Image (cartoon, grey):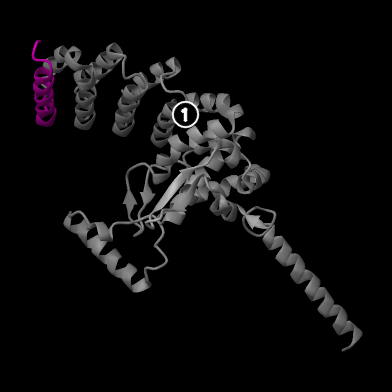
Amino acid sequence: MSRSRKTLLASVIVVTLLLVAAWQQGWFGEPAHNGRTVTEWLDQLELPKPEVTSGGRLTYAPRSPEVIRNDPALQSLMAIGPEAVPVLIKIINAPVNWPEEIGRWERIQRGTKYRWSQVRGASPSQRDRPHWTEKQLNRKQAAVFALIVLGRHPRVGFSRFLEPDAAPLVQETIYGTKLDYPTLSLSFTSPAVERAKTVYPEIEQGLFDAIQRGLKHTNPMSKIASMDAALALSRGNPAWKEPLVRLTGDTNHRVQIKAMWALGGNYPDDHALILRTMGSVLEDRRNPTQARVYAVIALKGAGTRALPVLRNALNDPDEAVRLRIKNYIQLIEEENPAR
């Protein structure tokens, strides 16, 4: 082989090795650390630890804050820092994936049945509903947690989780159809915040400030996530009262209902607050039926104190609301026969 050919071959080998190294470090794709990408580290991060019981059932055992904090996967994600955020957002919003064991033909069959059931207005069978794989659920859970604990860096953390691209109003099903309800990832908000404040106690004040801002957000899903986070961070904190009461009058009925639920969860024994707030929701007939029904449900916890408010709303124009009120009045009276 001539010297020129040997030189060319050596150059090709060097360039190839450099390309491989660059790919491993995420230069042409995801950011990486120690040879693994963000997604690979997320898959390695065990928040609860999976265990198989003697009976073959999969369970999850909690891990201590110290163990999670020292987990090489979490340390690597923290080392990547804010550069990991676009990948985390993408994973948080990723639509449901098909399980690997379901082949292409079966996917087509299930998709056809699912769409046909929607056309007929029927509810699809459990088998034909979209299902999240365990791997994707765990990856999403890890991504939400990682995004929140990255709050040690400026312009990252819970505030970033609340932005519209991280908390969209709709999500896609496995069949590509749209669903008008909060993304599944929002269900991870409370456990992620709870875990974040125990693993990194130093970010609690930053979380508190971000939640306060989130309760005033313009994005409905961001408001809902903030209410979940408020419950997880400091249940019963007086700072949440005014924002939650305000959100019971929100124009988005999902936000309204979540605010009423969060009030009950934060201040279950503050009957005066519950009576005043739920009574206002019932009085305002512009509120949707669903919100007024939930107000009635929330009032039941106040027992006999709720009877005057409930009786005052017996003239509600919606039969569903009136029926719920009558049932609850009867239940309360039966539980308190002396009154």
**Magenta segment, prevailing SS (helix, strand or loop):** helix
At label 1, counting other C-alpha atoms closer than 10 Å, the crowd grade (few under 14, some 14-19, many 20 or more) is many
Please check the rendered image and state whether residue 45 is part of the magenta-colored stretch, yes or no: no
In this picture, is 253 found above or below 139? above
Looking at the rendered structure, the number of numbered marks drawn on it comes to 1
Magenta residues, as a range? Answer: 317-339
In the figure, residue 28 lies in which quadrant?
bottom right
In the figure, residue 13 lies in which quadrant?
bottom right
Tell me the quarter of the image containing the N terminus: bottom right
In this picture, is 24 found above or below 103? above
Side of 255 where 116 appears, left or right: left
- Residue carrying label 1: 214
Please check the rendered image and state whether residue 323 is part of the magenta-colored stretch, yes or no: yes
Side of 268 where 319 appears, left or right: left
Type of the residue with mark 1: Gly
Q: Position of residue 326 (x, y in %)?
A: 9, 24
Q: Where is residue 133 in the image (x, y as percent from the top left)?
A: 41, 57
Tell me the quarter of the image containing the C terminus: top left
Does the rendering let one see residue 94?
A: no
Q: Nearer the viewer, residue 246 or 39?
A: 39
Residue drawn at (69%, 57%) of the image = 25
As helix, strand or loop, the secondary structure at mark 1 comes to: helix
Residue drawn at (56%, 51%) of the image = 42
Q: Position of residue 240 (x, y in %)?
A: 42, 19
